[in-house]
Amino acid sequence: MRNSNAPESLSIGADQGAAIAENGAATAGKAAADRTLLRALLRDRNGVIGGTLVSILVASVLLSLVWTPYDPTAVDPNAPWLLPFRDGHVLGTDMLGRDQFSLILVGSRETLLIALASAGIAAALGVPLALVAALGPRRFAAGVVQLIDVAIAFPALLTAMILAAVFGGSVWTASGAIGVAFGVHLARIARAEIERVHGTDYVLAATASGSSTWRTVRRHILPNIAPTLLVQLSLVMAVASLTEAALSYLGYGSPAPAVSWGRILHDQQPYISARPLLVIWPGLAVALSVLGFNLLGDALRDASDPRLRHRDPKVGADAHTGAEVRAPVPPLPTKGALLQVSGLTIRIGGRTVVDGVDLTLAPGERLGLIGESGSGKSLTALAVLGLLPEGAEVTGSIRLDGVELLGRRERELARVRGDRVAMVFQEPLTALDPTMRIGRQIAEPLRLHRGMSRRQADLAAIELAERVGLPDPAELVRAWPHQLSGGQRQRVGIAIALACRPALLIADEPTTALDVTVQREILALLDALAREQGTALLFITHDLAVVSRVSDRIAVLRTGRVIEHGPLERILHEPDAPYTRALLAAARATAFDAGAFEAADPGPGDHEPADPEAGVRTATEPVEAAL
């Protein structure tokens, strides 16, 4: 029965006041995020030191563009060598009569330019190579990996010297050599990070919601590897500063009259033994710039990761007003089976893990898929969504609304995921993207499949958060996943899955990681929302007590085969297969007193006597025993 009080549409603001409020809220949110990042940097000692050193470098570059105390190119070999603070020369002069302070100021330009250019080239080369190597077709990716391994064998300094000898020393020659050399190193590290993130549950959940490969990369993979990239790019900038100094010192840098810290060292080389003070200032400038890049990179990594900084989830509330927009609801089939799985066989690594599975699920029906770990339950569900791991060989048929899904292109499957079929994953601690706020993750399917604006989807996310029982939803949607409890995260996962009112909901052991009380709440919520929306439910578990609460029929899997299926009551009380009887016996043997549990935590109107055979239920008796 549909809940008459359930919301049927999503309210959004559409008048001019709402637009003004939206712009103001967006500006305030961005400013708050900037303040948070700045506060995190200021709390970090490395951030303060590194930021100060890099700021001094940038300030030196800007100052040198408009003013220097003396002309750094003015050479007077007859002028006496001056110590610091003599005759108006803050750092003294060199053996050619040039002002050391002016040289340091002007030399900072080339150091900063090469550092930035090298980091930009490394990122532009390394990140695409890493994406191709991690996510591209297997053979092509293997070729890219071999290319990276070969390129790593060439040292950056040697490559830069060869290029300088061929094309002449310049800022761009040095930047290109350093950027390419470290770009392949960056590609190798980024590839490992991309593969790690790509295997997480929240990326799988985004794909299951219908997110395209590029959108998944842009919104989930790149933000999660950004801290690692920041550290690596800061290292590139630091090494670029050192490499530029080394090239210029060896005579492979920019030719005179260009000024760089390395060229200053090169020019003073004949006089170092007699005047060692000449190398102190350029050497100190190189060392401090390298230290600044390294410390600031480490601090930015920590500050950019919301899990590593303290954050108050309460931000100023958005304005809510006015007009109402009804999100389109996909029509449900009225005849025949919604889902038909026929002869599904899955082979991974030459081993058959799912063998000829046949399942049907009618609109609005609940099917419990039970079995021990490794029986093929989750793989069957992932096959429906086209999310099997790479290398899996699939045969058989999977039809949704009579349309064959096996063999469909990724773009076609993306339109189905999150819209017609959605999934609630097992582990709530890893099923959410740690770098995205809760509201944006709930809103993402609505923007993908319903074409809502960002404002509309954000307001809809608040309503969905309220529907799944999250406390103070208007504030909670601004929180980060790590600020929520396990039960709250699972409610967020349910809100994401049901956002587009799918025809089929797959729940893959959604209560395994939760305590008993929270399990009961999540099961009741799933049951109520699925019934309210007329959604068919494929519930995967190894827990007989759980499946008995939410299923109309049960299918029992063992070693990849369906060994028994039928109505709930028959399977629980008159099973045919010996394996099913063994499961029930094990459940009874390990059950605790369900009646005592009910007495300790009675529900409304719950005054039934304890069930003498805990672990199995009739149509009205609760079961609390886990298999």
Image (cartoon, rainbow, N blue to C red):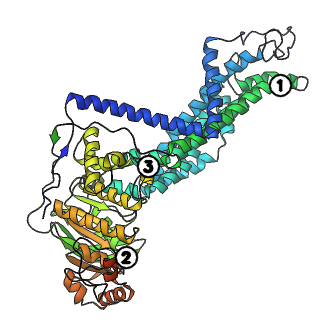
Q: Which badge, 1 or 2, comes first in the chain's sequence?
A: 1
Residue 555 image position (x, y, % from top left): 25, 79
Is any part of residue 60 visible from this angle? yes
Residue 360 image position (x, y, % from top left): 19, 72
Q: Nearer the viewer, residue 623 or 114?
A: 623
Q: Secondary structure at mark 3?
A: helix
Residue 423 image position (x, y, % from top left): 30, 61
- Residue 352, which numbered label? 2
Separation of marks 3 and 2 at Cα, in angstroms: 31 Å
Marks 2 and 1: in contact by CB < 8 Å? no
Quarter of the image that includes the C terminus: bottom left
Residue carrying label 1: 269
- Residue 221, which numbered label? 3
Residue 618 image position (x, y, % from top left): 21, 83
Residue sitting at the far left: 335
Q: Nearer the viewer, residue 289 or 273?
A: 289
Q: Is residue 217 left or right of residue 76?
A: left
Look at 17% across and 59% down and name the residue there.
533
Q: Is residue 335 above or below residue 553?
A: above
Residue 6 is drawn in which quadrant?
bottom left
Question: 10 Å neighbourhood of mark 3: few (<14), some, or many (≥20)?
Answer: many
